[in-house]
Amino acid sequence: MQYIDFKRIERVLKLDKTVYKEIRDDKDALVPALAVLLLSAVIGGLWSILASFGLALVAVVIGTPIGWVIGTGILHIIAKLFGGKSTYTGYLKAMGYAEAPMALGVIPFVGSFIGGIWSLVCVIYATKEAQEISMGKAIAVVLIPVVLLVILALIAGMYFISMFGGMYPRGYSGY
């Protein structure tokens, strides 16, 4: 069994919409999807891994699959609310391949940004095709958790500002 299907990765990178249903329905695609996910994360995080003398590799190898399973689970629940038809495992396989552009993080300065945007587009296509929902619903499925996280971050930020804002007298101007 070939663990990484480079033809599928190429199709994902070219935004071939038909590849996601194929991956979803391939009973042997879970391990290759995990391999694509880990390889993309290691390549994309290479500079961090090198800068940490390899310590970040542990975080990448452990954290990436955990984030994949939990993140896909959250998106799957939202997709089901929008009429999604995929199984969790089928969607998980498609999402593993959709993260392939994150390998561009190896390019200094702009790689992570470009890979992140490209991966976001791939995740939307994977959601649309694997879940068999409209493009608008797929965008909503992917963006709802992002919006909720931003709102939670703003609330947490306001809480900490209000908590620590009274530590200094009003007339404090430095030294």
Image: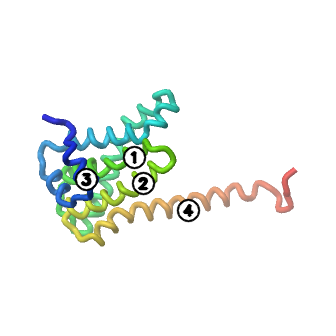
Mark 2 vs mark 4: which is more N-terminal? 2
At label 3, the amino acid type is Val
Mark 1 vs mark 2: which is more N-terminal? 1
Contact between marks 4 and 1 (CB within 8 A): the answer is no
**Which image quadrant for residue 136?**
bottom left
> In terms of secondary structure, where does tag 4 sit?
helix
Contact between marks 2 and 4 (CB within 8 A): the answer is no
Mark 4 vs mark 1: which is more N-terminal? 1
CA gap, disc 3 to disc 4?
34 Å
Location of the N terminus (image quadrant): top left
Instruction: Return the x and y of residue 125 as percentages of the image width and height.
Output: 27, 61
Residue closest to the eye, 17 or 168: 17
Mark 3 vs mark 1: which is more N-terminal? 3
Furthest toward the top, the residue is 53
Contact between marks 1 and 2 (CB within 8 A): the answer is yes
> In terms of secondary structure, where does tag 1 sit?
helix
Residue at figure coordinates x 18%, y 52% from the top left: 90
CA gap, disc 2 to disc 4?
26 Å
Mark 3 vs mark 4: which is more N-terminal? 3
Residue closest to the eye, 168 or 50: 50
**Disc 3 marks which residue?**
12
At label 1, the amino acid type is Leu
